């Protein structure tokens, strides 16, 4: 079932709602009556603090209900109406845009008494012809509805986008204000405003609550659609969030200790179960509640404590844990041993010697992982709702599982220091010999810059990108280039410039930078156009599947392609309305640069639309019949964007970067690209875009980085280090020290040679032309590898034979060093002895 099909299930009439869902309807009706929100405006003037404001607005309402017109002397009272009515009508904050003497489209000044008289004498919004300006036109439905509602609340509802959205998406009826008024008039006269609002509220409630029961729909997809397109009232958004939480968090997460100091773990893991002691309790299914278990514990086990925690553990083990729950196993208070998924209900196994309370578990991983903090003491604890203290916005169980899966990355002190350099300089290069984890460090720094902690999240983040340079990499691969495309008008191909990796990434970062800045009105329109055009395109695509859409005469729109609408099927060469041109024209209408008419469209807006104006205008009219820009504002948090360029020195950087060498230093400024994309050849690297390069200092096959580029990057050394304290037996420290002695004289495993204050003394095995820090074989070569299971986790019982690493990784590179003159021939005896 599609989202739209699910929405249409709730297309129910007022009669059906009041007859079949009376309890829901009546509850909302009474609630709204008590909140005094949907009742007629005149009856809630007491919400205004100022008695003078109440009197002024009452005067305006009295005149609206009478046969008399407003006079110029009423201007002050009308000004109070437009500025104060927002205290009692939720949409009226938009009405305060209507201020006396605002400049209008024709250069005249807004006179409130003329505006109110015009609206008062107009029956339908479509007949309203008072000349406004671009901004006020966006809000005309709001002020029209409020004034007309005050004039006659039985004929005119207040314009609420919530009602409009429900009409459009559920009732599948026209969502404009005049159609809303017609629908409103079909409701009972008594308490019409309350009945109308309560009807829509009941629809929304049924729609939201139905998500839990409906099995044939993607619940998350429906929730996202409702929040983005339909629901815009906080109480219903909160209800959606609650439903979402209930839907996604049915699974619980538990920390469990398999006996004192986890002495039972190996046996339980092999058997595929979890188990508890307290065998003298007998079958836990025979107890009705936790208190009965507690009393039995006190009577059976000699203890001075109340045994409350033990009772909770046993009760939860038998009754609260469900099949599908995740069990995280701990040892003591500082170590994790594994995790698994519960696959059976509770059972009592009389055949076991001890630990007879059992559940079968599909154990996913086993090993030893330090957590660096204190774990809970209890034998069994539900941690589903616990928040992580380390991972902002994450749950505690996510942190623990990430530790076990090896995905949790908490940047080291040195990496945090490097990220501060990156924030200052905007682009850095991590340089060092092979095997020092430069790319890993780059990812760790990216995680910190992006506020993430799980390395798997990088691949899904739109704020992160990793590429690798090679000698044939060019500007056209990295920044902008020309590509050949099939000609949509017929045979052959045409050539078009488009943004590549950096161009696209910089564009996204710049968009966020602009959105998060103060001056975003133009960008707000762009977002509105993009969002609503996508919706419009989808509707057109669905409509043309049933029948073609007439544009003019016998010319129909018959197909929606990747980037255009196609029309003129019977022509020798059917024509198109390009999406890009169409969106430019939508924006031009919103900014009053274009009026939809039968006139030609100016060439400067679109040459193609200029010559095909009849068809563009027809489609524009269709768009604006369905979508009304209400001056929505969009706010966005400033985000960081991180691009990692692995092996950055393997390409000719000066050639690949081109004019961006300037942009690297002068962030936020436009530079002229050699290629024009769209209507501009300007490129900008915004301040929130960060670049991390990695460079292998032992690679002599590539050219040096020239000074112009070197000046724009900060260079940071990443050197080999002893990982024994972190990895214990998984780091071959003796082998690491032996290889290190080929580069460092009197190598000492206790010394941190990455400390800039430590002096490296070159070993007797090195030639004079090289520095140890450029070629010393890195620590990653000396880490024990394991075979992986089906979910890419290490299987600790299956270590990879380390002799393979020595023979096929370590020795070959050291022997290559001898050939390249980095190590002397005397080093061969040491290499052979590895």
Image (cartoon, rainbow, N blue to C red):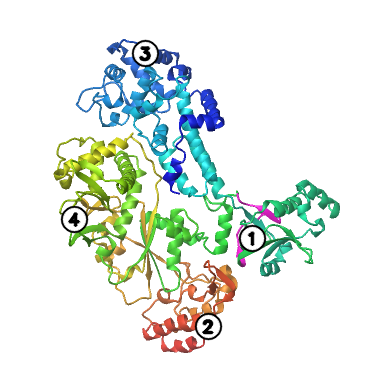
In the rendered view, tell whether residue 537 sits above or below residue 117.
below
2 or 4: tag closer to the N-terminus: 4
Please name whichever residue, 811 or 596, is drawn nearer the observer in this view of the structure: 596
Q: Name the residue under label 2.
A: 803
Q: Name the residue under label 1.
A: 343
3 or 2: tag closer to the N-terminus: 3
Report whether 132 appears left or right of 744. Answer: left
Q: How far apart are marks 3 and 2 (CA)?
A: 95 Å
Q: How far apart are marks 4 and 1 (CA)?
A: 59 Å
Q: Mark 4 points at which residue?
A: 489
Q: Which of marks 4 and 3 is in front?
A: 4
Q: Which percent across, then down, holds residue 765?
A: 44, 84
Q: How far apart are marks 2 and 4 (CA)?
A: 62 Å
- For the point 48% across and 35% down, which residue is it? 203
Q: Which of marks 3 and 2 is in front?
A: 3
What is the span of residues highlighted in magenta in the rendered image?
Answer: 366-384
Report whether 164 appears left or right of 782. Answer: left
SS assignment at label 3:
helix
In the rendered view, tell whether residue 128 sits above or below residue 276.
above
């Amino acid at each position: 079932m599609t989202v739209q099909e699910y929405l249409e299930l709730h297309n129910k009439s007022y009669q059906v709602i009041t007859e079949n869902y009376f309890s829901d309807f009546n509850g909302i009706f009474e609630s709204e009556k008590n909140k005094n929100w949907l009742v007629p405006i005149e009856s809630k003037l007491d919400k205004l603090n100022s008695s003078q404001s109440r009197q002024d607005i009452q005067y305006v309402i009295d005149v609206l209900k009478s046969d008399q017109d407003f006079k110029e002397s009423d201007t002050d009272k009308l000004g109070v109406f437009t500025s104060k009515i927002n205290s009692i009508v939720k949409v009226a904050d938009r009405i305060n845009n209507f201020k006396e003497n605002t400049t209008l489209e024709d250069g005249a000044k807004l006179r409130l008494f003329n505006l109110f008289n015009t609206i008062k004498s107009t029956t339908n919004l479509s007949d309203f012809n008072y000349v406004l300006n671009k901004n006020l036109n966006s809000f005309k439905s709001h002020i029209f509805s409020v004034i007309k509602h005050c004039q006659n609340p039985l004929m005119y509802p207040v314009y609420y986008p919530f009602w409009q959205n429900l009409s459009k998406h559920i009732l599948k009826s026209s969502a404009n204000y005049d159609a809303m008024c017609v629908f409103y008039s079909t409701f009972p006269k008594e308490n019409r405003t309350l009945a109308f609002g309560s009807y829509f509220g009941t629809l929304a409630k049924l729609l939201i609550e139905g998500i839990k029961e409906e099995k044939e729909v993607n619940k998350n997809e429906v929730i996202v659609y409702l929040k983005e397109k339909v629901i815009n009232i906080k109480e219903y958004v909160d209800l959606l969030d609650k439903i979402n939480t209930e839907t996604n968090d049915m699974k619980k997460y538990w920390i469990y200790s398999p006996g004192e100091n986890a002495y039972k773990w190996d046996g339980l893991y092999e058997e595929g179960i979890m188990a508890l002691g307290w065998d003298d309790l007998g079958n836990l299914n025979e107890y009705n509640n936790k208190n009965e278990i507690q009393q039995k514990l006190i009577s059976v086990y000699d203890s001075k404590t109340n045994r409350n925690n033990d009772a909770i553990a046993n009760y939860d083990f038998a009754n609260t844990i469900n099949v599908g729950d995740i069990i995280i196993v701990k040892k003591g208070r500082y170590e994790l041993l594994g995790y698994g998924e519960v696959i059976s209900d509770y059972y009592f196994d009389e055949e076991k010697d001890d630990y007879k309370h059992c559940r079968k578990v599909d154990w996913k991983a086993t090993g030893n992982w330090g957590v660096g903090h204190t774990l809970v003491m209890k034998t069994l604890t539900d941690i589903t709702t616990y928040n992580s203290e380390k991972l902002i916005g994450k749950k505690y169980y996510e942190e623990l599982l990430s530790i076990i899966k090896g995905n949790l990355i908490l940047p080291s002190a040195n990496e945090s220091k490097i990220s501060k350099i990156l924030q200052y300089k905007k682009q850095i290069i991590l340089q060092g010999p092979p095997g020092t984890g430069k790319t890993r460090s780059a990812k760790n720094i990216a995680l910190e810059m992006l506020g993430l902690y799980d390395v798997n999240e990088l691949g899904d983040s739109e704020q992160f990108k990793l590429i690798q340079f090679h000698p044939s990499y060019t500007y056209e691969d990295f920044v902008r280039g020309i590509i050949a495309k099939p000609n949509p008008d017929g045979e052959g191909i045409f050539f078009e410039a488009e943004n590549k990796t950096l161009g696209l990434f910089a564009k996204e970062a710049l968009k966020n930078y602009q959105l998060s800045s103060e001056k975003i009105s133009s960008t707000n329109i762009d977002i509105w156009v993009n969002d609503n055009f996508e919706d419009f395109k989808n509707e057109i695509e669905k409509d043309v599947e049933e029948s073609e859409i007439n544009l003019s005469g016998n010319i129909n729109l018959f197909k929606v392609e990747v980037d255009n609408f196609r029309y003129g099927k019977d022509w020798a060469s059917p024509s198109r309305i390009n999406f890009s041109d169409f969106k430019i024209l939508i924006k031009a209408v919103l900014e009053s640069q274009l009026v939809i008419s039968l006139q030609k469209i100016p060439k400067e807006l679109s040459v193609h639309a200029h010559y095909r104006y009849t068809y563009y205008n027809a489609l524009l009219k269709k768009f604006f019949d369905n979508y009304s820009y209400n001056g929505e504002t969009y706010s966005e948090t400033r985000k960081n964007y991180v691009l990692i360029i692995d092996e950055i020195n393997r390409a000719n950087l000066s050639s690949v970067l081109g004019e961006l060498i300037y942009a690297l230093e002068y962030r936020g400024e436009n530079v002229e690209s050699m290629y024009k994309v769209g209507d501009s050849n300007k490129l900008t690297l915004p301040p929130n875009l960060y670049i991390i390069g990695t460079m292998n200092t032992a690679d002599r096959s590539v050219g040096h980085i020239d000074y112009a580029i070197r000046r724009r990057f900060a260079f940071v050394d990443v050197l080999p280090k002893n990982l024994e304290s972190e990895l214990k037996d998984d780091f071959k420290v003796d082998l690491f020290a032996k290889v290190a002695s080929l580069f460092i004289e009197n190598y000492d495993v206790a010394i941190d040679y990455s400390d800039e204050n430590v002096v490296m003394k070159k070993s007797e095995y090195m030639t004079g032309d090289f520095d140890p820090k450029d070629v010393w074989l890195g620590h990653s070569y000396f880490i024990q590898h394991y075979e992986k299971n089906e979910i890419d986790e290490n299987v600790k019982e299956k270590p990879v034979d380390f002799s393979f690493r020595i023979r096929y990784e370590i020795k070959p590179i050291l022997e290559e060093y001898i050939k390249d003159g980095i190590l002397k021939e005397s080093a061969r005896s040491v290499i052979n002895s590895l």
